[in-house]
């Protein structure tokens, strides 16, 4: 086991990416069926495979605007089981608080996804393996990464649709910071900040690129995200098998130009597609669901 | 002593011994789990059947030592050996055996090895590494540059105070700073490095500077973009324990109040165990209406986290070898 053997393919050699937008007005809807029917469009190779769902779990969230909503996580879990996956794990390594059980209890994950003792993997304290990085965007040469992440057959990034006060936006690529184990790098994983957040996002995704992304945009966060921003209802789930294209589509839904999000523009050269003409949009059109998100002054250049 | 003081003193004494149910929980669940999950190499992983790592090994050892105190069981002897063997050439400890760079675990390893007479040399080298491990965010050059940086508005903290980072070459954070302070407090005079007195002063000032506006600590960002950061239980506990030589200070008082008020809302057993340890170390009462550890364990089996099991042992064991009530040893300042 050494990396997920995801070959790096320059984006100009990649076929068109497909991104699907589904409307969902609230978390009360039957999300498992909605996600299942959406996944069928992608013909995913998950039968008899182990799937890891990687939500964005940050911390206490009484307003439900910080973390990926448990209804979306549970819906995705059921959908992958219906697709024939042999096992669907849920795992994250929260960045700011090492009491992961307190976080999953505070977001009521077990109420939605059932008992978690054998289903949830705290990626912060998983066994680790040294992984040389495939790219040199940052000065990091290697990372110790959780064996669960390296060993699963299918990895799904499940972020919340949010702005971010350092990176501009936090979506399926930035969400992969959560696979970097706190037990090696601390709470927060400060070594990634010193390496440069934008650059570290690229290096991590080059070595553990998600196979699929499902973005919880039913209720997102604008302004001073990822923790202290403001609630923003958007009413969508955005998903696809190219995390870069999914993130680019999310930016367009948020009224932001993905080409001006530093790490996303760079990801568009090696990890997936950013350009609209390289992305086949299915489901709802971007225009019909566009919901402009407010950004901090430092990120005004992303608007439009 | 008035009748009210006597009652409070009795209650505290009975609290320290733990209730019968809690003692049974430790005896029937936690200690057997710790003993049965020790790996053949003497260490513990974060989970049963996972690879040995220095950090959970340190906590499992602290728990076993407290449980068996003053005896040192055979399992602890093997655990000490594992800890000693994972020390790097420069005196630091890594977080995983394969890693070649030391980190905050060094403080935890020094702390636990203080209980073992054959480890003085290893401890001395570890403490020496800690003294030399300065955070990168607060070098004189960075402080100079910081005067012109827009980041001053974002992080209005005083960078002349310096603690410890999680890993070398990064910023000061609350928990690793607290761990280093605790290791220095616990070490006997003959092992106390001369440079540690200055580091301790700077680190204590850094912790106080990083307190959240209403009391308590988070990882180390009390204010971001003008918005107050929310305190968290675990960093608050470690900061309070590291600063308990000054219990009357405003930061301690405010933060203890915050911790006491927060106990009712704690949702994780790890936070719960540490909060209990901290309040007891400050001689405070544990709320009668707090949930029982056994019921917390039944919820998710602590996610099979060995470290949480060890913290629970430490919190509920009546013998107070570990972080006893009262002030820590005073060292030359």
Image (cartoon, coloured by chain):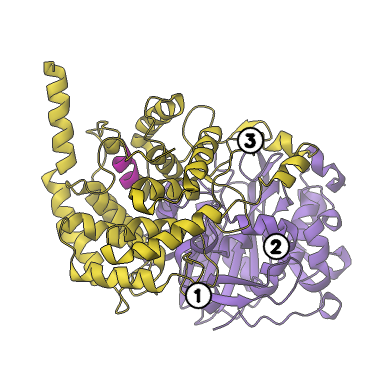
Residue at which label 1 appears:
A147
What residue span does the magenta drawing correspond to?
Answer: B272-278
Residue at which label 3 appears:
B157
Residue at image point 40% right, 57% down: B108
Q: Position of residue A281 (x, y in %)?
A: 79, 64
In the image, taking residue B165 as reference, residue B179 lies left or right, namely left
Q: Are marks 3 and 1 in contact (CB under 8 Å)?
A: no
Q: Which chain is purple?
A: A
Residue A104 visible in this rendered orientation of the protein: yes
Residue A43's quadrant in the figure? bottom right
For label 1, the crowd category at 10 Å Cα-Cα, with few meaning under 14, some 14 to 19 and many 20 or more, is: some
Instruction: Name the main secondary structure of what is drawn in magenta.
Output: helix
Q: Colour of chain B?
A: yellow
Task: Please tell me whether mark 1 sits on a helix, a strand or a loop.
Answer: helix
Quadrant in the picture for the C terminus of chain B: top left
Task: Please tell me whether mark 3 sits on a helix, a strand or a loop.
Answer: loop
Task: Please tell me whether mark 2 sits on a helix, a strand or a loop.
Answer: helix
Q: Label 2 marks which chain's residue?
A: A
Question: Which numbered disc, 3 or 1, marks the residue closer to the eye?
Answer: 3
In the image, taking residue B79 as reference, residue B227 lies left or right, namely right
Q: Label 1 marks which chain's residue?
A: A
Q: Position of residue B92 (x, y in %)?
A: 48, 64
Name the disc covering residue A201, or none: 2
């Amino acid at each position: 086991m050494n990396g997920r053997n995801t070959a790096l393919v320059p984006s100009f050699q990649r076929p068109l990416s497909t991104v699907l937008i589904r409307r969902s007005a609230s978390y009360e809807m039957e999300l498992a069926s909605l996600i299942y029917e959406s996944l069928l469009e992608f013909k995913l190779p998950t039968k008899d495979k182990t799937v890891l769902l990687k939500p964005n779990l940050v911390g206490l969230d009484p307003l439900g605007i910080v973390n990926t909503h448990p209804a979306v996580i549970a819906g995705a879990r059921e959908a992958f089981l219906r697709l024939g996956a042999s096992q669907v794990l849920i795992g994250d390594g929260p960045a700011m608080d090492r009491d992961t059980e307190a976080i999953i209890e505070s977001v009521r994950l077990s109420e939605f996804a059932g008992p978690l003792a054998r289903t949830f993997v705290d990626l912060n304290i998983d066994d680790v393996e040294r992984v040389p990085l495939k790219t040199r965007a940052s000065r990091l040469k290697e990372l110790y990464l959780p064996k669960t992440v390296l060993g699963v057959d299918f990895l799904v990034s499940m972020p919340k649709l949010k702005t971010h006060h350092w990176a501009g936006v936090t979506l399926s690529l930035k969400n992969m910071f959560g696979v970097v184990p706190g037990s090696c790098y601390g709470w927060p994983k400060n070594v990634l900040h010193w390496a440069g957040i934008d650059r570290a996002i690229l290096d991590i995704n080059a070595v553990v690129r998600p196979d699929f992304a499902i973005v919880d945009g039913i209720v997102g966060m604008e302004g001073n995200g990822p923790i202290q921003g403001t609630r923003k209802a958007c009413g969508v789930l955005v998903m696809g098998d190219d995390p870069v294209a999914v993130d680019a589509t999310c930016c367009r839904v948020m009224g932001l130009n993905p080409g001006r999000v530093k790490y996303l523009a760079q990801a568009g050269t090696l990890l997936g597609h950013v350009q609209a003409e390289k992305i086949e949009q299915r489901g709802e059109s971007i225009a019909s669901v566009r919901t402009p998100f407010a950004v901090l002054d430092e990120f005004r250049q992303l608007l439009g | 002593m008035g009748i009210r003081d006597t009652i409070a003193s009795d209650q505290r004494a009975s609290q320290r011994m733990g209730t019968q149910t809690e003692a049974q929980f430790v005896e029937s669940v936690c200690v057997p789990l710790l003993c049965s999950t020790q790996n053949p190499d003497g260490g513990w992983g974060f989970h049963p059947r996972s690879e040995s790592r220095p950090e959970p090994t340190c906590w499992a050892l602290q728990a076993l030592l407290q449980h068996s105190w003053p005896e040192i069981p055979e399992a602890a002897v093997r655990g000490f050996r594992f800890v000693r063997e994972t020390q790097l050439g420069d005196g630091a400890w890594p977080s995983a055996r394969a890693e070649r760079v030391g980190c905050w675990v060094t403080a935890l390893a020094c702390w636990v090895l203080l209980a073992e007479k054959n480890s003085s040399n290893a401890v001395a080298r570890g403490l020496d590494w800690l003294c030399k491990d300065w955070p990168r965010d607060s070098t004189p050059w960075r402080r100079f540059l910081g005067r012109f940086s827009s980041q001053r508005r974002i992080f209005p903290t005083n960078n002349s105070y310096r603690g410890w980072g999680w890993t070398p070459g990064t910023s000061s954070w609350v928990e690793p700073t607290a761990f280093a302070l605790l290791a220095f407090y616990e070490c006997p005079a003959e092992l106390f490095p001369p440079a540690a007195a200055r580091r301790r002063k700077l680190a204590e000032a850094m912790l106080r500077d990083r307190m959240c506006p209403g009391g308590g600590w988070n990882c180390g960002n009390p204010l971001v973009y003008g918005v107050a950061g929310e305190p968290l239980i675990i960093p608050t506990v470690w900061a309070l324990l590291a600063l308990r030589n000054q219990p009357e200070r405003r930061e301690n008082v405010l933060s203890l109040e915050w911790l006491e008020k927060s106990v009712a809302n704690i949702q994780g057993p790890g936070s719960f165990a540490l909060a209990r340890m901290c309040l007891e170390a400050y001689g405070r009462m544990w709320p009668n209406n707090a949930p029982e550890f056994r019921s917390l364990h039944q919820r998710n089996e602590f996610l099979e986290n060995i470290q949480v099991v060890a913290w629970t042992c430490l919190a509920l064991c009546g013998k107070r070898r570990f972080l006893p009530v009262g002030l820590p040893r005073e060292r030359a300042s």
